[in-house]
Amino acid sequence: MHRRFRFVLSRLIHRLIMRFGAGLPRTALARLIRQTAQQAWPLLAANLLFSLVLALSEGLTFAVIYQAARLLSGGGAAVVLTLPGLLAPLGQVLSARPAGSQFGLLLASAVGLQTLMSLARYGNGVSAGWFAARCQRRVSPAIHRHLLSLSYGCASRYSVGDLANRATLAPMTVQTQLQEGAQVFTNLLLVGVYLVVMLLLLSPWLSLVVIAMALALALVQRQLRPSIRIISRQLAEVRRRLVSGITEDIQILRLLHSTAGITAALERLEQRAVLQEVRMRQMTRLVMMPEPISDLLPVLAAAGIGLLSWHLFGGNGALLVPNLVTFVLVLQRLNLRLARISGSLNRLTEISGSMQQVEELLDPADKQFRRQGGVPFTGLEQGIRLEGVELTYPERQLKALLGIDLEIPVGSTVALVGESGAGKSSLVDLLVGLISPSRGRIVVDGLDLQRINLDSWQQKLGVVSQDVLLLSGSIRENIAFALPDAGEAAISVAAVAADAAGFIEALPEGYDTVIGERGFRLSGGQRQRLSLARALLKNPELLILDEATSALDSPSEARILQAVDRFAKGRTVLTVAHRLSSVVHADQILVLQQGRIVERGRHGELLELGGCYAALWDGQRKPLPCR
């Protein structure tokens, strides 16, 4: 029996969710709301049951109060009690009793029904709170998963602060959407109960007054909602810029402190905070308007109803008193429910700006996603070949790379040199898989890189870039980032190979030293050596050094290059260098200029050509004048 009930209930909730979901716009956020609701159906079922018990006990309470008022207005004489529905047998039993007994039992019934109503309200609130907790648990990882599924180029269109703001907004937005929707449903259910009480127990003419009051409040709400929606979107944009500004200032703390930029940063943030205050005041003025109106309408309605009731019942106290007392109570509770519905609708309109930002982030229409699936990559056997590779960034007119043909045999060392903006980093990003060629292809062991599983490919790469990215944790955590299960011995070997063991062991806590946000407690050279150790720990098939020694002095650079030479024996290395002295032993040197390869060969061959490479070499070899 219990299983049968649970099955029927689950089907009912599922149908309600699907019916509700069909009315939602077909957006990614709407799908996320439907999925969250479907997966948490037991909590929604409990909330629905408690709402029904709440509404039923509320309606029956008014029926009991009406009969008690009849007893009081009848001068103490017993009356025939006509109680509806579940209370009908109780009415038959009470009708045979004296007035005092009837009145006492009616009061006891009212107290019992109100107790049941209080328990139902508690259960309703708890189930809604648990559902909100379930939303937080499910939505936050879903948003995080979506952000990480975006391609690197697509995610880079947003600032870090903007992404953090939207990711924070999303769980609260979905939670508010569902909670306020549930509140609207519960309160509409109670409004329906009150209207039934009006129609069955009281005069239909009195019900018209209530309906008119509800329509008046709905009309006010309808007039205000477009303005609230506009202000909501403006406020969401201001908040986005405010949070984004704070996040970006934290990211560039070193720059602000070293360029006296703190005052300007504070002024920028103050301007955004002032604009937020203006928008919040506008929102408050609009949102608070329905409340005093909803407080005034019942008073006007009660005054009119008193006159109408006197006219309808001809001054007959036996009919006038119970109807008027019950009506005033119903009117007061109805007004409360209408006010709550109005508040929920206002809150749903208030979050429309946040919803728009979250929907824009989740909308897949203009997004590029990280490649999934493909042939697993197990190791480099022959080499890498670039065939007619071109690259054009969406936001730029000029091509970053044009007609790139390149062979990287396995076990060789290839160097890329050229001035800033020549396309060296773009070529590295293509090989790593951060972006895809606009034309041409990259072939790995005879297989197009686009057909290779991206995760398995990147797991075999070791990348050391000029812009070192470090965690705020310990040195050990940073070195073992890609291999969290690496042992102490392997981490130590990688640190020695990267010439980092010396400074690490000199620190008070050694490998357990916490380096702070982006490694601010370390020098630029120390950060680059940590990054190199992290790459060497993976024992990569392809080691990519993107100006990896740019922050090192000459002695440190020499030690790093010796370590790389030892590691590179029998391995494939691609190095992007600014200092040409670091690439003189490369098997192949490519000179890039405006996205093209203009020269290629070994160090001596390129010097003999007397072209771009020779000019770069002479420029770096020329000594600075002494003063």
Image: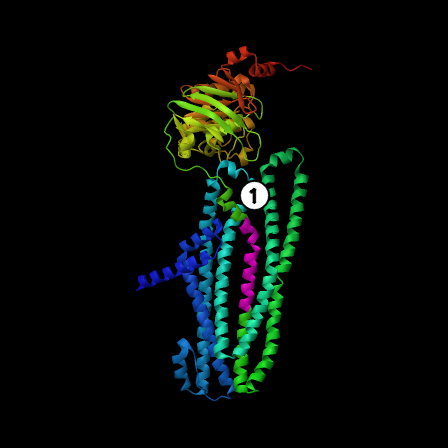
Residue 245 picture quarter: top right
Magenta segment boundaries in residue numbering: 336-356
| Residue that appears at 41% across and 29% down | 448
Disc 1 secondary structure class: helix
In this picture, is 380 found above or below 333?
above
Q: The C terminus lies in which quarter of the figure?
A: top right
User: Where does residue 220 sit, x and y in percent of width and height?
Assistant: 60, 64
Q: Tell me what residue is drawn at x 52 percent, y 86 percent.
A: 318
* Residue 110 vertical placement versus 612 (above, below): below
Residue 601 screen position, x and y as percent: 49, 15
Return the residue found at the far top.
Answer: 608
Asked if residue 348 lies in the magenta stretch, the reply is: yes
Is residue 344 magenta-colored? yes
Q: Mark 1 belongs to which amino acid? A: Asp
Q: Which residue is mark 1?
A: 162
- Which one is in front, 63 or 448? 448
- Which residue shows up at 64% across the image and 35% down it? 257
